Amino acid sequence: MIAATRNTIAVAIAVCLALLPLHELSRDLRLALAPLIVVVLQTIAGLLRRFSFRSWLPNTAQWVVLATGLAVLGLVRGIPQADYTIGRPLLELFTSAMRHVAGTQVPMPAQDDALILLLVGVAILTILVDITFIAGHSVLLAALPLLGGYLAAVAVREDPLWAGNLVALAVAWLVLLGSRIIDHDQHWPRGLTGRAERRYPWPAFIGVGLRLAVPAIAVALVAGLSVPNDGPHDWWPRQQEKTDVRLVDPTIELNENLHRPENRPVLHYQTSTGAGVYLRSSTLTAMDANGWRQIDMALSTGFPAQIPGLGQVQPDLTTHVQIGELNSDYLPAPYAPLNWSADGLWRYDPASLTVLGIPAKPEVSAVANLDYVVNSRRSDPTSEQLAAAVAGVPPEGQLAREVPAGVPQRIIDLTSQVISPAATDGQRAVAIQDFLRDPALFSYSLTSPTGSGYDVLTHFLFTEHAGYCVHFSASMALMARIAGIPSRVAVGFTPGTRQDDGGWEVTSHNMHAWPELYFAGLGWVRFEPTLGQGAEPDYTDLSAPSAPPTQNTEPTPSQQRSSAPPPPPTPAATPPTQPAPPVDGFKIDLRWVFSGLGVLLVGAAPGLLRWLRRRRRLTAAQAPARIRGAWAELRDSAADLGIEWPTGTARQQAAHDWPGLDAAGRAGLTRIALLVEQLRFAAQPPTGGAIADDVRLVRQQWLANTSRVRRLLALVLPGSLFGAGRDHRIERGDQARS
């Protein structure tokens, strides 16, 4: 019973350690309930194991508790429904949770359905670890469910995981392995010596654990820091098979849709002016070393009462949009939308004016086949207004103004060179756009690396000088912030192609990203730095006279910048020049080198542990410990090589017809068996003699009589380390007698 309780506690500790990567997935503080669920489930299993000998009862009780909890949850969620069934609310819950996981960048914001999904996953993981480790007597299989949280975090994160996650995972596995070692080694001393000799040598076990833990943690640190990651993956398709265009999350790189061989129409629109317009879906305001991403939105009902930077204005553009097969919950609309006639439930973010739909069914896109009219206010300043514009304070506050930490100094210096001739913030913004649109410096390419992080942008600006809309827009938005101008990246569609009916057709290849910069009195203003994907706005041509503005947008005193603008960067001694081409040479990605080394070291861990156990047994300081260890080593060696161990006394087992042993090997085995019996029955314990040499002799002959495959498996994945070759019925009997 002591062993069963210890193993149950070991499972609880291991699972709690393995849950550490969950903090990489969600910001929800309620995930602290996960360890409580583990404790409850293992407490139930431990109590049943203490008072019942039925091996199937503890895990069955755990499944019953989980099913009961889900049933109660289904009834509670089903109360507002038209029917009071359990299955439908649960299905909607999990569907909603998976949609949230697939359509939200990690770490995900708090959401009830996603929380429930994660906690249910924790419960299932706990039960699976308990089944494989305790009921299945396998440490190796128990490692598979332990990987669940770590693999989930690896699958959805763009950047490498914190190395401590892998360290925790290694420690979790060591906890299970240590508990199994205690079970294994405590079995052999029973009945061989007196009571004093049956105590487990804790100092020896702690020493072995430390020797194993140090290299394991070192491997975890190396592997955790160096494992390459390809970024987030969409594991939950939110559309029908025939729908190719996806706009689930605006942070998803546009490269996916731009590279599609089929350029499919997604929507058709007409404007009251007849001109084409950019249709915006959402914006990316936060920036760090990994790139631009969306921030949490404060959704409101109804329609916007005012436009950021412009106040209460009247619409001056009407757009009629007809959407086909577009999978998105964001309403494509010209900036800035003031009202819309779209069917369904819609919310908007007052800061970004992003319009988000709530689909009637989780599996249906909010905008698919939608026909609606949107009235908007164009944000088109005159060139004079832009030339005199100063940066303002947007509703997003510091989030839209903050220059992220760790920006490469090369990008900062380049920005200083580009904006040095400009006198105002508006002129600096145009200077950045003109720099990126210079065909002598940059070109449009769909073969460039994806992403918008520091490494990608540095490669784009200084090495390749070629990219697509993500690179151009992300670069301008970052350079604008360095210049002291709030910025963000908008995601949506370019105007498309004019049709014979006077309308415009937008296709999947019209998906686009562009920067928006915030100026006092002007609000968010669109720029177009991407070559070949649209002309720069007329108001960015500061050398040409502008047409009269459609509405007075001159800054008022209250709209002026509350603080003095930052001083312009120190002009560079030389004008900006095209960076020098990279020097070709032999390059090695050290991440792959360290990852390969880490995999090799982790793969060698079982064999290393098996060697350490053999060494400890055969070099024990006390003769009784060496004798017990020698006999246990023979038993484990037989298990590693797939040799059946017979029943009976030690002398009867030595007399067994062992395959591969010659006369010398049989004699050595017999000498070991006699020492075991002397240790049990003699008044004085034997000295042990050359027992280690006899063990090596028997093992060598067994190895020589075994296939190469079996020897390799015994070296890499020794079965004795994971419970192979053990008679659990005998062990339980010994525990009961002790």
Image: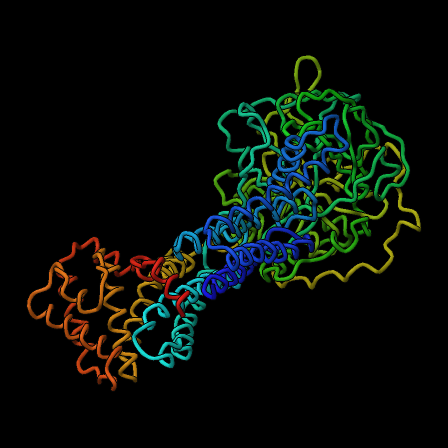
Residue extending farthest top: 501
Point 61% across, 42% down: residue: 101
Q: Residue furthest right?
A: 557
> 259 left or right of 697?
right
Is residue 315 shown left or right of residue 431? Answer: right
Q: Is residue 53 above or below residue 294?
A: below
Q: Closest to the observer: 485 or 207?
A: 207
Classify residue 377 by image quadrant.
Answer: top right
Residue 369 picture quarter: top right
On the question of residue 576 being in view, the answer is: no
Residue 277 point in image, percent of width and height: 72, 28
- Picture coordinates of residue 303, whole percent (x, y): 85, 33
Asked if one can make out residue 92 in the rendered structure from this viewpoint, the answer is yes
- Picture coordinates of residue 463, whole percent (x, y): 49, 52
Placement of 212 over or under 133, stated as above or below: below
Asked which quadrant contains residue 650, the reply is: bottom left
Count numbered badges in the picture.
0
Extreme residue in the left direction: 663
